[in-house]
Image (spheres, rainbow, N blue to C red):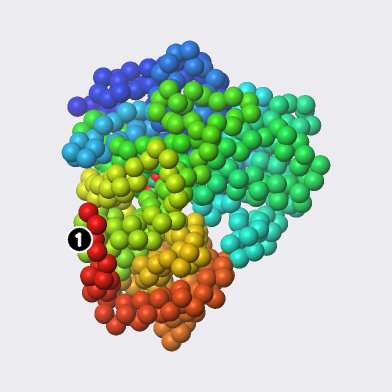
């Protein structure tokens, strides 16, 4: 079999082997600018949009992918070399791979190379929507102050150098200013990150920045820009070298950066697009009036479930999520966490069968073909815990509900932050707060609650006597007996409901 490099020129040869875009990419206008062209965007929004573009009458919704950080050079160069094309490999439950070439990203820009080009593109009249996957930590929100963090040196840089920004806030502000100054229309800014009320958060953080940087722009944004909330979902592990070589071996396609993902996909979006939107509902997205309950459910069950499996699994020495959830003791622990501590805080979820949802999560986590990396899940835990786990703990504390299992996971995270698993192997910790976490983890050896002093993560949690007690008990128990023994003990104290 002859190998083909993935690019426009080879597309018709490649289409004899796997599905390729059956629409004329050269006719597409760019209606969407997306910031953060990592795996998740390419498995999710770009996939939905690719499907939509197969309706030949849709020509307004090509995507321009923006790589914002220096760190993103590789993905930018890859997309440039491959004419924006990449392979999406869905790893099915039965072990087969469904592959297709995605064509919805028709332009790509590297912000550090030419910031003005990015600002101009965001301000272009044909762009109606700016979507974001900038990670949970990217919103510059400080949990301790509940405000925008102006002490971030990058924000200070953007305030001083508006024409060469480094953060999303600097870019959006300049682009919206251009729109206003040129008498153009507003647009929709849509977050695709895992944050409760991600649209509200984006609006609040952007307006905080704009109040300082361009106070005269505030009112214009308030009337001309909308920020729909959305729940996004598709497990997308990091692409491995063997995914790349496997694609060559099985299909003869040389793709420097294919994306691998699970079959499940979901996107629930509030229908609040001031300048119109693609008919994503025709390809499976759900457009609703109020997405809050869906977000809460997903963040506090799926994402939190991931963090539970990640931290406990890492300490035991596992490297993938399926290994952790397929350990029956850990699985029962997670099930108890979802039933006993999360379910009571979810309130009324009209139209959703929570029991089925939780069951489906265990199946998705357990998919042995996905091999979702525990390193990926545990990375940036300091940005994830405040969104995925702590709201549950705080609600449970307010209602005098159980917090034992969450306290156990947080104690395990303190021990994880020491940097070694229970077999003495080095953990690969990636976190913006890595050194602070480690410093507090070391202090915790003599005073377990020291870890809770990180106010930007835990807020006022350390002041709760009930939490402090459960946490300290769990910490000491794990230190003395190891994760698995403690998990078994906790499971026997709770009845596992199937
Ligand atoms: C994961 C998410 O980052 C994480 O910790 O929980 O990336 C998760 O895989 C996605 O949100 C799935 O939709």
Task: Determine which residue is flagged by label 1.
Answer: 328
Image location (x, y in percent) of residue 419: 38, 72
On the picture, is 292 further left or further right than 486? right
Q: Does residue 77 sit above or below 327 in this rendering?
A: above
Quadrant placement of the N terminus: top left
Considering the numbered disc 1 on the image, is that residue within a helix, a strand or a loop? Answer: helix
| Quadrant in the picture for residue 487 | bottom left
Position of residue 36 relative to residue 30, above or below, is below
**Where residue 223 sits: x, y (%)?**
73, 34
Q: Which of 175/303 is in front?
A: 303
Residue 320 at what x, y percent from top left? 28, 56
Instruction: Answer few, some or many: residues within 10 Å of disc 1's Cα (few below 14, many 20 plus, some between 14 and 19).
Output: few
Residue at (51%, 24%) from the top-left corner?
A: 278
Return the x and y of residue 212 as percentages of the image width and height. Answer: 77, 51
- In this orientation, does residue 404 appear? yes
Residue 129, compared with residue 20, is above or below; it is below
How many numbered discs? 1
Which residue corresponds to the image point at 50% horizontal and 33% vertical from the top-left? 288
Residue at 53% across, 55% down: 137
Quarter holding residue 66: top right
Residue found 49% across the figure and 17% down from its top: 58
User: Can residue 35 be seen at all in this image of the molecule?
Assistant: no
């Amino acid at each position: 079999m002859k190998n083909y490099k993935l690019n426009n020129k080879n597309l018709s040869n490649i289409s004899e082997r796997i599905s390729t875009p059956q629409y004329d990419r050269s006719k597409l206008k760019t209606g969407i600018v997306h910031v953060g062209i990592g795996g998740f965007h390419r498995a999710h929004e770009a996939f939905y949009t690719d499907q939509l573009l197969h309706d030949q009458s849709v020509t307004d919704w090509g995507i321009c992918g923006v790589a914002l950080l220096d760190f993103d050079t590789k993905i930018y160069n890859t997309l440039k070399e491959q004419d924006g094309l990449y392979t999406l490999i869905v790893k099915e439950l039965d072990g087969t791979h469904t592959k297709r070439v995605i064509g919805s990203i028709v332009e790509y820009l590297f912000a550090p190379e030419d910031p003005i080009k990015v600002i101009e593109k965001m301000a272009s009249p044909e762009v109606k929507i700016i979507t974001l996957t900038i990670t949970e930590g990217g919103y510059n929100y400080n949990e301790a102050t509940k405000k925008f963090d102006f002490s971030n040196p990058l924000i200070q840089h953007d305030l001083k150098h508006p024409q060469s920004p480094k953060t999303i806030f600097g870019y959006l502000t300049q682009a919206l200013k251009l729109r206003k100054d040129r008498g153009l229309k507003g647009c929709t800014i849509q977050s695709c990150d895992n944050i409760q009320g991600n649209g509200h958060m984006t609006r609040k953080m952007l307006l905080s920045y704009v109040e300082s940087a361009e106070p005269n722009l505030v009112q214009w944004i308030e009337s001309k820009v909308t920020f729909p909330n959305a729940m996004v979902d598709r497990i997308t592990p990091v692409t491995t070298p063997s995914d790349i070589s496997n694609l060559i071996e099985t299909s003869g396609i040389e793709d420097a950066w294919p994306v691998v993902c699970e079959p499940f996909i979901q996107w629930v979006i509030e229908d609040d697009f001031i300048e119109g939107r693609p008919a994503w509902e025709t390809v499976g997205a759900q457009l609703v009036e109020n997405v809050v309950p869906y977000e809460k459910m997903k963040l506090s069950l799926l994402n939190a479930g991931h963090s539970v499996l990640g931290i406990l699994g890492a300490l035991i020495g596992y490297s993938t999520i399926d290994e952790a959830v397929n350990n029956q003791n850990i699985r029962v622990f997670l099930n108890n966490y979802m039933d006993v501590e999360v379910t009571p805080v979810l309130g009324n979820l009209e139209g959703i069968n929570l029991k089925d949802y939780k069951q489906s999560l265990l199946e998705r986590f357990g998919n042995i073909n996905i091999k979702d990396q525990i390193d990926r899940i545990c990375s940036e835990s300091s940005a994830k815990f405040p969104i995925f786990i702590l709201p549950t703990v705080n609600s449970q504390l307010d209602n005098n509900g159980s917090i034992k299992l969450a306290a156990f996971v947080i104690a395990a995270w303190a021990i994880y932050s020491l940097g070694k698993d229970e077999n003495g192997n080095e953990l690969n910790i990636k976190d913006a707060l890595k050194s602070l976490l480690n410093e507090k983890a070391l202090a915790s050896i003599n005073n377990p609650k020291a870890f809770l002093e990180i106010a930007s993560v835990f807020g006022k949690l350390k002041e709760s006597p009930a939490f402090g007690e459960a946490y300290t008990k769990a910490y000491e128990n794990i230190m003395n007996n190891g994760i698995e023994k403690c998990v078994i003990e906790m499971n026997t104290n709770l009845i596992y409901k199937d």
